[in-house]
Image (cartoon, helix red, strand yellow):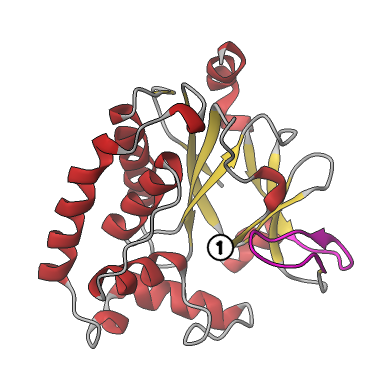
């Protein structure tokens, strides 16, 4: 965990967005959090946050009106732009809110649960990556074609050219931007250091992304985790 804290000094160089991905509108806010292994954490401190969130969402949204919300429209528009039908594959933040409104809130583990709460509350997709399982810098770029992607909950696949992705310095595909994560860097019971990343698109203010990362870190603080004292942005 000392290594994780040490990465805070080089936070600005931990994630990059290249010109091609930036031209599509990809932009991120990110930081680091760390603490006892995930498998040793109790989810208890998050239960009150879940109840508060569900009450907030029920008072703020309806299933019928949700697609008209500006942030929902922004992510849906980006999905169309990169060739994904958002009525079939919904942005993760929207999908979480829809599940909450239907009374089916997911629980995975305390760290992922913290990310989900923040994502639904701020309506911003959140990625969580085991910082000890990738080689910095993580770079958001467009696939060249043929890269192997091992999605959580799916079969390995070879990517076509031009897919927005996040890869580490070895070329390992960590994420399909901004909606699918890889098993390679997923949160595991032994995970102790996490890259917290908010995925932005055109129409989503940078301040909103930073707020989302800060909310994840606040929630992880309830679990006894520490965090870098600031949030970085790219580009």
Tell me the residue at 53%/79% (across/down). Answer: 89
Residue 86, percent across and down?
A: 49, 82
User: Which is the main secondary structure of the residues drawn in magenta?
Assistant: loop
Residue 229, percent across and down?
A: 39, 22
- Relative depth, front residue between 89 and 191: 191
Occupied quadrant, residue 73? bottom left
Image: 62 above or below 206? below
Q: Tell me how many marks there are.
A: 1
Tell me the residue at 69%/51% (across/down). Answer: 183
Helix, strand or loop status at disc 1: loop
- Relative depth, front residue between 224 and 228: 224
Q: Is residue 29 left or right of residue 47?
A: right
- Relative depth, front residue between 173 and 169: 173
Image: 15 above or below 152? above
Q: Is residue 154 left or right of residue 62?
A: right
Which span of residues is magenta-colored? 142-157
Residue 104, percent across and down?
A: 31, 69
Circle 1 is placed at which residue position? 178
Task: Examine the rendering and report whether any part of residue 20 can be seen.
Answer: yes
Q: Residue furthest top?
A: 2
- Circle 1 residues within 10 Å: few <14, some 14–19, many ≥20: many
Occupied quadrant, residue 75? bottom left
Quarter placement of the N terminus? top right
Image: 80 above or below 222? below
Tell me the residue at 55%/86% (across/down). Answer: 85
Q: Is residue 156 magenta?
A: yes
Task: Examine the rendering and report whether any part of residue 18 can be seen.
Answer: no
């Amino acid at each position: 965990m000392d290594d994780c804290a040490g990465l805070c000094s080089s936070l600005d160089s931990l994630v990059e967005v290249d010109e091609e991905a930036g031209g599509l509108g990809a932009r991120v806010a990110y930081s680091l959090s760390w603490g006892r292994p995930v498998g040793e954490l109790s989810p208890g401190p998050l239960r009150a946050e879940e109840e508060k969130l569900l009450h907030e969402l029920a008072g703020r949204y309806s299933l019928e009106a949700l697609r008209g919300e500006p942030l929902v429209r922004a992510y849906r528009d980006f999905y169309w732009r990169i060739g994904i039908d958002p009525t079939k594959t919904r942005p993760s933040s929207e999908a979480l809110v829809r599940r909450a409104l239907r009374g089916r809130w997911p629980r995975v583990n305390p760290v992922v649960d913290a990310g989900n709460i923040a994502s639904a509350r701020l309506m911003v997709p959140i990625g969580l990556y085991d910082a000890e399982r990738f080689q910095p810098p993580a770079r958001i770029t467009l696939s060249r074609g043929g890269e192997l992607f091992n999605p959580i909950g799916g079969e390995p696949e070879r990517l076509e050219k031009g897919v927005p992705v996040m890869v580490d310095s070895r070329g390992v595909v960590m994420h399909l931007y901004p909606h699918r994560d890889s098993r390679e860097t997923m949160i595991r019971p032994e995970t102790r250091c996490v890259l917290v990343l908010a995925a932005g698109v055109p129409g989503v203010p940078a301040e909103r992304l930073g707020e989302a990362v800060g909310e994840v870190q606040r929630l992880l603080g309830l679990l006894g985790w520490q965090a870098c004292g600031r949030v970085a942005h790219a580009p």
